[in-house]
Image: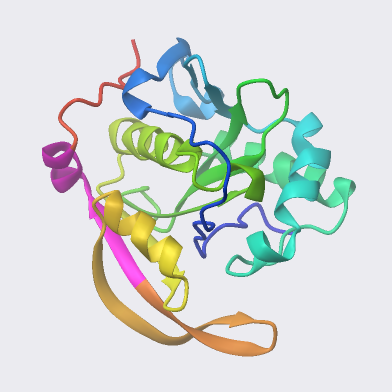
Amino acid sequence: MTASMTSHVHQPMMTNLEPIRFDATELVQTMNVVRSWTNGLPVFKNQRMLLRELVKTDAATLLSVLRTEEVARFISPPPTSPAGFEKFIQGAIGERRAGRQMTFGMVPEGHDYAVGLVQVRATSPDFSVAEWGFAVGSPFWGTGLFLASARTTIDVAFRHTGVTRLEARAAVANGRGNGALRKLGAVREAVLRGSFLKDARYLDQNLWSIVASDWYQLNPELRCAIH
């Protein structure tokens, strides 16, 4: 079991749920990082959601929402048991302490546990280049929960890890995932042929990137700096 699960991003399809207005510009930091994010991730919230580091008690909920066929279709296989998710969460915390990864859990209003996650993982020794991905439970597809969480996580990564380039891979067939990356301002750079093994088939993937200079030109209103 590794700490990374969401290298292959997946934006779920819209549902008939009434859209909830999640807005990253309204997320307010509620916990300062002492010295460094490696000592503990910041916590952000507004009236509709909370964005925080995953904790052990998230395991059962993540198992129930991320193991469904529709969610797992375009992501690397998630753990198959609560114990497996607990190990995944502990691994993510260990990687954060080592300065190699940050993994945020998405907790909507009225919920105590995470129903999705956003992960940023260093791919270069100095964390100047990183890969990011996400997974969200199907009851929250189309609500904006992902976009609010992703924008805040990306902003934190650019401001506080030293990363200057974020990369993401999405299966070419994953129209929603590619659309979400485009909406966030990512640029499609290449098609990686046969780069993702899923259910005994090799799928083509799009390689997307977001660089820090472009991010702040597109989002000058974001202010997630550590105080």
Q: On screen, 210 above or below 208?
A: above
Q: Is residue 216 magenta?
A: yes
Question: Considering depth in this image, is 127 or 75 the residue closer to the camera?
Answer: 75
Q: On screen, 129 above or below 48?
A: below
The structure residue drawn at horizontal position 54% and vertical position 23%, both measured from the top left corner, is 49
Examine the rendering and report whether any part of residue 137 can be seen: no
**Image coords of residue 20 (percent x, y):** 49, 31
User: Which stretch is magenta?
Assistant: 207-218
Q: How is the image coloured?
A: rainbow
The structure residue drawn at horizontal position 51% and vertical position 29%, both measured from the top left corner, is 38
The image quadrant of residue 155 is top left
The structure residue drawn at horizontal position 69% and vertical position 83%, both measured from the top left corner, is 199
Question: Considering depth in this image, is 21 or 120 the residue closer to the camera?
Answer: 21
Query: Could you tell me which quadrant the N terminus lies in?
Result: bottom right
Q: On screen, 218 above or below 33?
A: below
Examine the rendering and report whether any part of residue 93 can be seen: yes
Question: Considering depth in this image, is 66 or 92 the residue closer to the camera?
Answer: 66
**Image coords of residue 43 (percent x, y):** 51, 19
The structure residue drawn at horizontal position 88% and vertical position 47%, both measured from the top left corner, is 83
Classify residue 148 as left or right of residue 107.
Answer: left
Looking at the image, how many numbered discs can be counted on the residues? 0
**Image coords of residue 169 (percent x, y):** 42, 67
Q: Is residue 200 magenta?
A: no
**Image coords of residue 165 (percent x, y):** 27, 53
Query: Could you tell me which quadrant the C terminus lies in?
Result: top left
Classify residue 99 as left or right of residue 95.
Answer: left
Q: On screen, 113 above or below 119?
A: above
